[in-house]
């Protein structure tokens, strides 16, 4: 599966942070400062340093400083203080980005309650916390809760600031992007179109905020398989990012990655390879060669090489991505699991099931524990383990795994999502091998609407 950078890892502070920065500046224009906001801060404000480290993707450093900031703010000002709430929110975000979801969640909820008490339920700080919770649950794969918090934020902004406010547009874009991730394209498109219309009317079509919103719409069309609509939008965004940020900025690299994924989907492997290599070079120059945010691009390029039949290159890139993730994020992080998953798929393609099976098992164990039993990534691992069992002729072992994978995808992504259809078709092929035509035929008719790129889900 090609991994997009518009919303990959829910990194709204990198790309979509521009939307919120612009929106919140407008929301606060002319607003009087509260007593809590006037309270003294530490010299060389620790919260600002943490936020900068997060922006630079230095999550381990940010985590250490965030713990220090929380302790100092709580000791100096107590729990009910704006600076303390910010330090706690930063710490929660670090836990979430590092995959410690169960630790992050209660901290986020505490921040939300504190900010409601300090500022009221409709203040931009409170709404920002709702967005943070939405991002957290998105990372965790709990799309229902992510949707709940993002809808809360949107409703507050529509009622308080109106349909055409920049903050409202930012919330529309976030919720629309979530629906894209969920495969709910019919819900996503009107939201993303409304967001883009607002940004273009308020700040102009060439403004970077409008380009960020255009980027999200391009990704929607690409995911829908409407590549004719997506390609020119990606090209516009790429030109804008290159002009505004330069060729080696993470935002530019993210757009290159997404455009490469489009070309990979339509079978133009030469263009896809060229753009993936440009994206990877840009990420390495801007973030460093060992930054974990390089790994989606590494894995995408590895998947491309696997599809091109160059399994040696694919293996090398997946191994590199795995090493980065294990060192930077730890052995049980979801992104570590993703690299394990890709590497296992390459070994399976090489015919080396002895190496593929334990890697798939390890990825599945991480995903079930960290993301939960109902996450789409868990379904992908289940489908791949089932595929190995089918290849060995162990149909009785494969069937319950494939059935469970399909049930997860139907619930999380919907019955019409391309990956749901691919898993349904694979289950149908299993039933055909088992001689059960009655079960096989309806499943085999559910052909995917788009080329599926997830390793282990190939038809």
Image: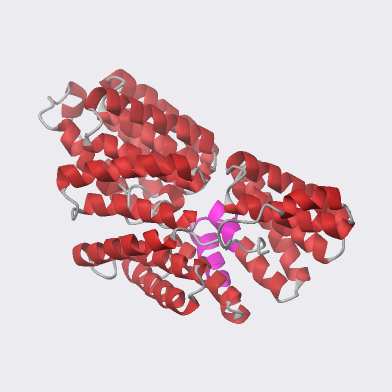
Q: Which quadrant of the figure has residue 189?
A: top left
Q: Report the front residue among 143 and 230.
A: 230
Q: What stretch is highlighted in magenta?
A: 317-340
Picture mark count? 0
Q: Report if residue 42 is visible in the image.
A: no
Q: Report the front residue among 288 and 175.
A: 175
In the rendered view, does 424 fall on the left or right side of 75? right
In the rendered view, does 125 fall on the left or right side of 454? left
Residue displayed at 58% across by 71% down: 319
Quarter of the picture containing the N terminus is: bottom right
Quarter of the picture containing the C terminus is: bottom right
Q: Report the front residue among 59 and 308.
A: 308
Q: Which quadrant of the figure has residue 247?
A: bottom left
In the rendered view, does 212 fall on the left or right side of 400? left
Across and down, in percent, residue 439 comes to: 82, 48
Residue displayed at 25% across by 43% down: 197
| Residue furthest out toward the left | 30
Residue displayed at 37% across by 36% down: 131
Residue displayed at 33% across by 37% down: 171
> With respect to residue 140, does 85 lie above or below?
above
Across and down, in percent, residue 195 comes to: 29, 42
Would residue 320 be counted in the magenta stretch? yes
Question: Is the magenta region chiefly helix, strand or loop?
Answer: helix
Q: Which quadrant of the figure has residue 41?
A: top left
Across and down, in percent, residue 211 comes to: 26, 54
């Amino acid at each position: 599966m090609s991994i997009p950078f518009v919303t990959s890892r829910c990194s709204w502070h990198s790309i979509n942070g521009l939307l919120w920065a612009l929106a919140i500046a407008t929301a606060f224009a002319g607003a009087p400062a509260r007593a809590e906001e006037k309270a003294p801060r530490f010299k060389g404000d620790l919260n600002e340093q943490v936020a900068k480290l997060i922006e630079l993707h230095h999550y381990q450093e940010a985590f250490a400083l965030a713990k220090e900031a929380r302790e100092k703010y709580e000791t100096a000002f107590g729990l009910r203080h704006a600076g303390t709430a910010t330090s706690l929110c930063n710490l929660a975000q670090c836990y979430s980005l590092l995959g410690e979801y169960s630790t992050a969640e209660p901290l986020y909820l505490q921040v939300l309650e504190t900010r409601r008490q300090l500022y009221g339920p409709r203040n931009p700080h409170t709404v920002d916390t709702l967005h943070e919770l939405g991002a957290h649950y998105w990372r965790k794969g709990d799309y229902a809760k992510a949707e709940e918090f993002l809808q809360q934020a949107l409703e507050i902004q529509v009622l308080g600031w109106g349909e055409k406010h920049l903050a409202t547009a930012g919330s529309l874009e976030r919720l629309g992007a979530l629906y894209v991730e969920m495969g709910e394209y019919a819900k996503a498109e009107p939201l993303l179109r409304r967001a883009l219309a607002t940004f273009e009317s308020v700040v102009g079509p060439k403004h970077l905020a409008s380009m960020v919103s255009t980027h999200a719409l391009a990704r929607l069309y690409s995911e829908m398989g409407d590549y004719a609509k997506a390609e020119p939008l990606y090209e516009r965004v790429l030109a804008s990012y290159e002009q505004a940020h330069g060729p080696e900025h993470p935002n530019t690299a993210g757009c290159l990655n997404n455009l490469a994924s489009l070309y990979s989907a339509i079978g133009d492997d030469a263009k896809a390879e060229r753009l993936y290599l440009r994206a990877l070079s840009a990420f390495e120059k801007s973030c460093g060669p060992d930054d974990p945010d390089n790994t989606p691009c590494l894995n995408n390029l590895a998947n491309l090489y696997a599809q091109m039949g160059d399994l040696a290159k694919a293996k090398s890139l997946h191994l590199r991505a795995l090493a980065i993730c294990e060192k930077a994020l730890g052995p049980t992080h979801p992104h570590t699991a993703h690299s394990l998953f890709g590497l296992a798929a390459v070994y399976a393609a090489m015919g080396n099931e002895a190496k593929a099976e334990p890697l798939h098992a390890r990825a599945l164990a991480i995903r079930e524990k960290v993301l939960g039993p109902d996450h789409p990534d868990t379904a992908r691992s289940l489908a791949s383990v089932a595929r190995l069992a089918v290849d060995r002729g162990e149909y009785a072992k494969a069937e319950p795994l494939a059935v469970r994978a399909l049930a997860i995808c139907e619930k999380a992504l919907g019955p019409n999502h391309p990956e749901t259809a691919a898993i349904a078709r694979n289950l149908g092929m299993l039933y055909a091998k088992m001689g059960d035509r009655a079960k096989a035929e309806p499943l085999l008719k559910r052909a995917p609407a788009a080329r599926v790129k997830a390793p282990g889900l190939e038809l």
